[in-house]
Amino acid sequence: MLKSMNVKTIFVMSCLAFATILQAAESQKASTDPLLAMEAERFRLTEAGDVDAIEKMLDDELSYCHTTGRCESKAEYLANLRSGRTKYHKIEVVGSRVRHYGDLAILNGRITIDVEAGGQSVQGLKMSYTDVYRRVGNQWRMVAWHSSPLP
């Protein structure tokens, strides 16, 4: 009986170790996805207010929907950033993942932001988002953004 218990214990421990290794490998794969790096760079550029660099990452068909429900075209979104009506002071990624579907990719994540909009400052705004990129040639362009506030 003692031997069979040890075998069962070893089997269970092996299964748990294998599952942990697989999960770590999947996490490593996801964290090294170029689109996650691109998204992190877009957030950094947004904090820095580098609108010209952001513009190069956006598709001409962009639909950018804010947590307020207001949606903007690419031109409207860029004009808003350039005018200073909306300033993103801090964007912290809490978690994100990417799924690829050929020339489309969907990113889902959670972020916390410090933003100034319409003369009001909000710190620690938590939100979830969905971001869609499409590949044009060998370049990825953001084509849609939608965010929702979290409690």
Image: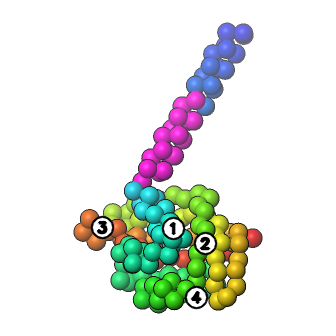
Amino acid type for the residue under numbered disc 3: Gln
Mark 1 or 3, which is nearer the eye? 1
Q: Which residues are magenta?
A: 17-33
Q: Magenta segment: does it hold 127?
A: no
Q: Is any atom of residue 87 visible in this view?
A: yes
Q: Which residue is mark 2?
A: 89
Amino acid type for the residue under numbered disc 1: Phe
Look at the numbered discs 1 and 4 and tell me whether their residues touch, using CB distance below 8 Å.
no
Q: Earlier in the sequence, mark 1 or mark 4?
A: 1
**Compared with residue 144, is residue 126 higher up or lower down, i.e. above or below?**
above
Q: Earlier in the sequence, mark 1 or mark 3?
A: 1
Q: Residues within 10 Å of mark 2 (few under 14, many from 20)?
A: some
Q: Secondary structure at mark 4?
A: loop
Q: Earlier in the sequence, mark 2 or mark 1?
A: 1
As drawn, the label of residue 85 is: 4
**Compared with residue 48, is residue 76 higher up or lower down, i.e. above or below?**
below
Look at the numbered discs 3 and 4 and tell me whether their residues touch, using CB distance below 8 Å.
no
Q: Which residue is mark 3?
A: 139
